[in-house]
Each structure stands twice: as C-alpha cells, then as structure tokens.
Amino acid sequence: MDISVVIPFYNEEESLKELNDWIIRVMNSNHFSFELIYVDDGSNDGSWSVVEQLAQTNPDIKAIRFRRNYGKSAALHVGFQQAMGDVVITMDSDLQDSPDEIPGLFKMITERNLDIVSGWKKKRYDSTLMKNIPSKLFNWTSRVLFKSKLHDMNCGLKAYRNEVVKNIEVYGEMHRYIPVIARAAGFSRIDEKVVVHQKRKYGVTKFGLDRFIKGYLDLLTINFVTRFGQRPMHFFGALGSLVFFTGFVIASYLAYGKFFLAEYRMTERPLFYFGLLAMVMGTQLFLTGFLAELISRISRERKAYQIKTKINL
C-alpha cells in the first residue's frame, strides 16, 4: 500500500464528506493504493454517522471511535498503530489542509528518502491576534530550543515513513512536537514543504486560549524529555550535587568560625539556615534523580484508550 491518510476529527460533520471525496479524487488521479483512517475523538454531533455512511460504500475507509474526547495526540497515536501504507500522511478534518498536497508530500518522502516532511503554512488565513502571532512566537521558540529548521512545527499536514510512526509514541498534547520526538528516536532526515492553507469553511476551531498555556508547558516538557528522558540522573544528580556542595561549603565556613574564631552564635545567622536548606534540597534532588533513573528502566504501560467502535479494522 502506498499511502495511509490518518484524519483525527472532533465534531466536523459538515466537512467530512467533502474532504473524503476530495482525497479520493486525488488518490485515484495519481493511481495510489491507499487507505483512509478516520479517528473520531469522541464527537457528540453527527460526525460518526457520516463516516459510517462513507465506509459502507468504500472498503478503503477505516474508522475508529473513542468513547470520549482524549485529544488529538491520542487520535494520532491510535491511527498510527493501524496505518499500513509505506507513507503515512496526517491532515486536519476542517478542510484547511488541502489534499492536493498529498502527491508532493509522497514524492518528497519516497524520492529523497526522507523520514518526515512537515507542512509549512507560509500564508495563513487565521486570525492574526489569536493564531498567527502566537504561532510565529511558538515556532521561533521551538527552533531556538530544539535547533530545528522547521518554520511551522504545529502544522497538521505532515508525511512520515511508516517506520517512523511505528517507533514513536505520541501522548498528552505532544502532537505538536512529533518531528522533535522522531529526531530524538533517531529519525533525523526531516524537511518541510510550503503548503496551501485555506480558510475554515464550516464550524469553528476546537482550540481555545488554553492551547497557548498547554503548548508552552509541553514545550518545556518535551525539551526535558528529549534531553534527559533516558538519563534523568544527569540532570537531577548534577543539580542536586551542586546545591548540596553549596550548602556544605556554607556549613563548613560557619563550623570553622565556631571552633576557631569563637563565633558562638552560629545558628542565629541567616546564612546557617540557607546552608542547611541547600544541603536538604540537594539531597532531595539527588534522590529524585536516583528514583527517576530506576523508573526510566521500567517499561511504562501504554495508556489504553477506550475505543467504542471500529470499521474495517
């Protein structure tokens, strides 16, 4: 199979049929063998009914339905597990990503032997205040922290070699950082492609202001995980040792003053309590690193998303 298209959606009943027909036209005109994997992230409108009707007339359509809303990362993770195509393409279901980009993405992966091709919405039609400016700030921060050359890390239109999606785990809100996660797993051949961004035709965006807070918290999380996830002792142990040593130096200085300089009121000095606190905190940080090192050696159980229904799987 050439291509698997993974499409997570949440309350997008107006756009699904139009998107589905558009993708199939592109696939047939380019003679691709393909599958469409729809993942319903707990929709409470008529979205699932639309997918059921589409699947009845086309065996290439597969669908998974969650019992509740888990988020886009969970939907992508489950979709990746089912994908069988040599190239896996993800796109949003709101018609803002153009299926006409699929042949170009597929060609870049196969002809240039890339691991990931990320879409770059160079010209956006979103609200400047709500999306454009925060997106540019977010992408700039990501490039600085991760030394990435990608201009649009958060673009939902991406292409992957199948091997990539089978060897990474996407959870929480980490779908924004899949290129970073993949690079940390050893998939370093990553490029980007300028793609067409379209105005939203139906409904409203499902992301609110909280995505800015979550996005930057996840930014810090993924920065730590990719650097110290397999060796947490290097971070906590080093920091704990430094803090403890600082406290030890202070305590040694005060002890010297007590025994050799006759400074009997050592415990009345604020410096004494600062040194004591530093040694306690240093010990705690060191033990945190030790426990984290033990935990990292235990295989973490994957979260079992409660799937309600499957079609053609």
Image (spheres, grey):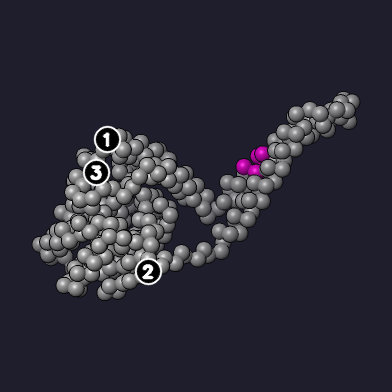
Residue 121: image quadrant is top left
Q: Is residue 23 above or below residue 60?
A: above
- Magenta residue span: 239-243
Instruction: Pick the residue in front: 216 or 256.
Output: 216
Residue reaching furthest to the left:
29
Residue 242 belongs to the span the image colors magenta: yes
Left/right of residue 163 with respect to residue 124 in the rendered view: right
The CA span between labels 3 and 1 is 13 Å
Of the two numbered discs 2 and 1 on the same chain, state the one appearing first in sequence: 1
Of the two numbered discs 3 and 2 on the same chain, state the one appearing first in sequence: 3
Place of residue 109 in the rendered image (x, y in percent of width and height, measured from the top left): 25, 56
Image quadrant in which the N terminus is located: bottom left
Place of residue 44 in the rendered image (x, y in percent of width and height, measured from the top left): 31, 60
Residue 289 belongs to the span the image colors magenta: no
Q: Residues within 10 Å of mark 3 (few under 14, many from 20)?
A: many
Label 1: element kind: helix
Q: Residues within 10 Å of mark 1 (few under 14, many from 20)?
A: few
The CA span between labels 2 and 1 is 37 Å
Q: Which residue is mark 3?
A: 121
Residue 169: image quadrant is bottom left
Q: Which residue is mark 1?
A: 128
Image quadrant in which the C terminus is located: bottom left
Q: Which residue is mark 2?
A: 307
Residue under the image location 25 percent in, 56 percent down: 12
Place of residue 153 in the rendered image (x, y in percent of width and height, measured from the top left): 33, 46
Amino acid type at image mark 1: Thr
Residue reaching furthest to the front:
45
Judge whether residue 243 can be spotted in this image.
yes
